[in-house]
Image (tube, rainbow, N blue to C red):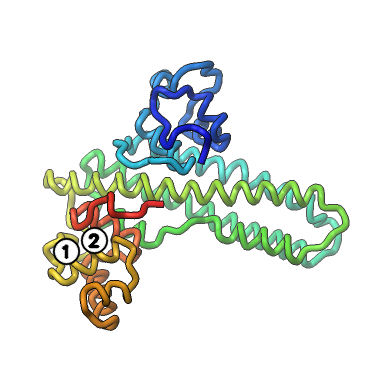
Amino acid sequence: MGRMSIEYVRQDKMRDLIDDNNLLLLVISRFGIHFGFGDSTIEEVCRENNVDCPTFLAVANLISGKKYSGYEISLKDLIGYLKRAHTYFCDFILPNIRRKLIEALNCNDVNDVAFLILKFYDDYTVEVQNHMKYENDTIFTYVEKLQSGQSTGRFSITKYLATHNSSSQKLKELKDIVIRHYRQPNNDMLNSVLYDIINCENDLISHSEVEEKLFVPAVIKLEKEKAADGKQLKNEASGNNNSIDVLSDREKDILKCVARGMSNKEIADKLFLSIHTVTTHRRNITSKLQIYSTAGLTIYAIINKLVDIADINLQ
């Protein structure tokens, strides 16, 4: 956590944010904000650059490990931020790391290990590009259609959340392979590219957190608003089965415990059930709601007022 207060506010000077956490340089850039803002406040800079201030503050606070909840998110601005981040990863930093990796590994020599490392990286890059292209072409398009009242079929954001994961894990694996197993006499360039890989890995982790902790909850809120207005079509393959009414009272009790981060054993002890019974109920909950991740179930429980967000550990 930075040196400033527990939460950035609109009256803070933009330049002080960078002094507090230099990683926010990337956040500023991805919101399309130009440098040269002098001593202007966050609110003034956002207004001058047509950026939604609450959305900027939510992202900046989340990235800096500060209080980020309670902000009204502009999905238009957040999608713009995420798309610019995708462009940065796919068109700039990943190709730049590859160029440095080739130089660091000295692929001009006949070195099978060097070529295997490079192939590992190339395969990883393709995975990241495909992942981000899917989000650009499918997920963001879905949200834009949802906002405009167009038909979105049976898709819902919880389906995306159930399969979503950070793109950083394989990059960490590559870093570990190089550090532990690759030997060469001159490590200056290798150190430089490893530093870039570590920074990219951390950036991807933060990027994934923005998607899961800000983007997805905002879309779920939008889906519920559209459903309440009668504009949203049936959710998933089971029509309106995501209604809280499809769950029994016992299943609701178990879902509350899951949302609070309790293990199956802790749930069993609290509700005086066997672990087998808890496991069976959890399978039924997942089947009825078509939500497979704990994060997705937690968001569902909050949205449907089974638990209060204050009871949830969001860190």
Please, is residue 292 above or below residue 14 in the view? Answer: below
- Tell me which amino acid carries mark 2: Glu
Name the residue located 67 percent from the left edge and 46 percent from the top edge. 196
The crowd level at tag 1 (other Cα within 10 Å; few <14, some 14-19, many 20+) is: some
Say which mark, if any, is on residue 241. Answer: 1
Query: Residue at horizontal 11%, vertical 47%?
Result: 230
Regarding mark 1 in the picture, which secondary structure is present there?
loop
Q: Residue 236 carries which label?
A: 2
The percent coordinates of residue 269 (x first, y second) are 27, 76
Does 249 appear above or below 24? below
Out of 224 and 91, give the one closest to the viewer: 224
The three-letter code of the residue at mark 1 reads Asn
- Secondary element under disc 2, as helix, strand or loop, is loop
Residues marked 2 and 1 touching at CB (< 8 Å): yes
Label 2 or label 1, whichever comes before in sequence order: 2
Locate residue 41: give its quadrant: top left
Disc 2 to disc 1, how far (Cα)?
Answer: 8 Å
User: Which residue is most to the right?
Assistant: 185
Relative to 313, is 14 above or below?
Answer: above
Residue pictured at 75% horizontal, 66% vertical: 181
